[in-house]
Amino acid sequence: MQPKALILFGPPGSGKGTQAKLLRERLQVPHISTGDMLRERIASGDHLGVQVQELMQAGRLVPDEIVNQLVADRTSQADCATGFILDGYPRTLQQAEVLAVQLRQQGFQPVVIHLKVDYTKIIARIAGRRQCPVCGALYSLTSNPPQRPDHCDLEGARLVIRDDDKEFVIRERLEAYDRQTRPLLDYFAASGDPFHELDGSDGTPQEVLASVCSVLNLE
Ligand code: ADP
């Protein structure tokens, strides 16, 4: 059987990152988050990080060539040979086209999972989101708070609000999604590759995971 490239698709705050982390444990394949990779580069202060920092903080997308290259480099590493999970990529038609060619050449079967969540929920969710600056673990003040307020359960580090999780930036990100990313749904639907839609609005992360596993025919 061909190894799978699982593509988690949905608006910001739809739960892609949370599901990707749960699926990584479940499937034992790498979780590739373009957002996390870009944030790492910003934190390291290298040339690419400096180049993308302003765009990300404004809630805009970074140029296709940059993310295409990051993903191509990452997916060609040995640990991806049995499959991987893409979170936050592709996000534009150009990215989707580049990815499709790459996956075909490398022999991966794309499988798209669309997590649908309505916008009022998203804004509330993102506003309550906190992240560990050390390990990247995600918390929600309402649905998944840390045991000790404001501190990571795993690292003990003080949790932070991502720069682009401020409310006015969230709206910009949702607009970028509507304008540049949502149109990919038609592209995926027409591609002939497996394409599953799930309601990610309600339920715990574990319940949403159960729905994801069921459409993927995992026990
Ligand atoms: P979310 O899904 O919650 O918006 P991400 O961590 O996936 O968060 O992305 C944060 C930001 O990183 C985006 O707003 C964008 O600036 C940048 N980014 C991430 N992935 C891509 C991508 N595939 N193409 C362009 N920009 C991206």
Image (cartoon, rainbow, N blue to C red):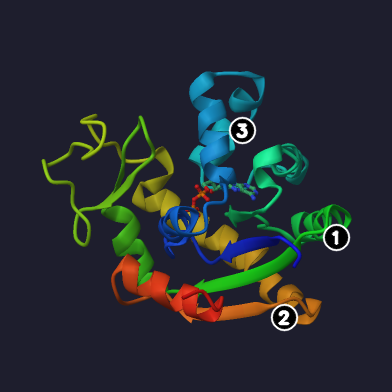
Q: Is 71 left, or right, of 201 in this rendering? A: right
Question: Which one is in front, 64 or 71?
Answer: 71
Tell me: residue 37, above or below residue 166.
above
Image spot of residue 134 (x, y percent): 35, 30
Other residues around mark 1 within 10 Å, as few (<14) / some (14–19) / many (≥20): few
Which residue bears the numbered disc 2? 189
Separation (CA) of disc 1 from disc 3? 29 Å
Assess mark 2: CB under 8 A from ligand 1?
no
Residue at the (77%, 59%) spot, across then down:
108
Q: Earlier in the sequence, mark 3 or mark 2?
A: 3
**Secondary structure at numbered mark 3:** helix
Tell me: residue 42, above or below residue 132.
above
Q: Earlier in the sequence, mark 2 or mark 1?
A: 1
Which residue bears the numbered disc 3? 52
Give the numbered dot on residue 162: none
Which residue bears the numbered disc 1? 104
Identify residue type, mark 2.
Ala
Q: Is 101 left, or right, of 95 in this rendering? A: right
Other residues around mark 3 within 10 Å, as few (<14) / some (14–19) / many (≥20): some
